[in-house]
Image: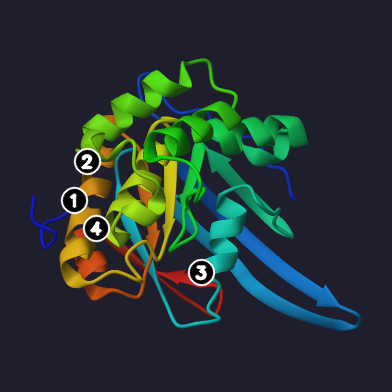
């Protein structure tokens, strides 16, 4: 697959989808986020709305300070909105306590960052297995790691520590660690920001394989036109709102 092709606090009772209809993987509904420092308020998100379907790849673009990172932290259940609702698989995150949210973060949501994804003293296999183990999932961590590494063509690099992997390989191992948990949504924050063009294409192919093999929705925050072009849809955030 070429990278130029498509990678093909206010509680609201979740709507029940029609029988036989799979709910969206991710929904942000009229989401506001306000940061307060003393008497100063900063409105980062202003009624943001976004829906992502299962197996859909969405590129989120926008200028610095537009609210992209805030949106990611809320959607990935790392923070809570000031108002509005966030749903994962049709279920409102407002319904869950912190223990339940931790389980969702471990098993239904995965985040791949631009760098610092891996433990430097662990091998690729151990890094992926650790991600599964820490998530508390009901599957053998080593078996899950070996399966994911094989899916992404990394079985030959399983015994290598990160310092013996290229930048592209490190990102692919990080994606394997996300995939091994079989999440509903994978967030990738500038996943190719530190890579050259060749490695960028390889990482895009890996994300496409993740989508196809695990039916995960993939949301990428990016400044790369190549990454945006490869996604099913591009969403622009300006001043805390979505512009399709």
Judged from the image, the secondary structure of the residue bearing numbered disc 3 is helix
Which label sits in the foreground, 3 or 1?
Answer: 1
**What residue sits 74% from the left and 70% below the top?**
34
Judged from the image, the secondary structure of the residue bearing numbered disc 4 is loop
Check whether the beta carbons of the residues at disc 2 and disc 1 lie within 8 A of each other: yes
The vertical placement of 52 against 73, above or below, is above
Q: Nearer the viewer, residue 196 or 21?
A: 196
Q: How far apart are the alpha carbons under marks 2 and 1? A: 6 Å
Q: Is residue 152 visible?
A: no
Residue that badge 3 annotates: 68
Upstream in sequence: badge 3 or badge 4: 3
Coloration of the structure image? rainbow
Q: How far apart are the alpha carbons under marks 2 and 4? A: 13 Å
Q: Residues within 10 Å of mark 4 (few under 14, many from 20)?
A: many
Residue that badge 1 annotates: 205
**What residue sits 64% from the left and 74% below the top?**
44
Upstream in sequence: badge 4 or badge 1: 1
Residue that badge 2 annotates: 209
């Amino acid at each position: 697959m070429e990278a130029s092709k498509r990678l093909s606090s206010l509680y609201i009772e979740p709507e029940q989808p029609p029988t036989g209809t799979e709910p969206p993987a991710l929904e942000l509904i009229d989401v506001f986020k306000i940061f307060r420092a003393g008497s100063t308020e900063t409105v980062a998100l202003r009624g943001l709305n976004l829906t992502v379907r299962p197996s859909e790849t969405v590129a989120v673009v926008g200028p610095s300070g537009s609210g992209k990172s805030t949106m990611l932290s809320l959607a990935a259940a790392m923070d809570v909105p000031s108002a509005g609702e966030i749903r994962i698989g049709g279920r409102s995150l407002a319904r869950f306590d912190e223990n339940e949210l931790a389980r969702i973060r471990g098993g239904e949501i995965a985040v791949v960052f631009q760098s610092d994804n891996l433990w430097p003293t662990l091998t690729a296999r151990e890094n992926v297995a650790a991600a599964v183990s820490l998530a508390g999932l009901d599957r053998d961590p080593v078996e899950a790691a070996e399966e994911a590494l094989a899916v992404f063509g990394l079985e030959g690099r399983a015994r290598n520590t990160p310092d013996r992997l290229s930048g592209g390989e490190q990102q692919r191992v990080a994606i394997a660690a996300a995939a091994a948990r079989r999440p509903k949504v994978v967030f990738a924050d500038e996943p190719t920001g530190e890579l050259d063009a060749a490695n960028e294409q390889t990482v895009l192919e890996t994300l496409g394989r993740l989508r196809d093999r695990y039916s995960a929705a993939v949301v990428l925050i990016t400044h790369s036109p190549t990454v945006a072009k490869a996604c099913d849809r591009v969403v622009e955030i300006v001043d805390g709102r979505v512009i399709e």
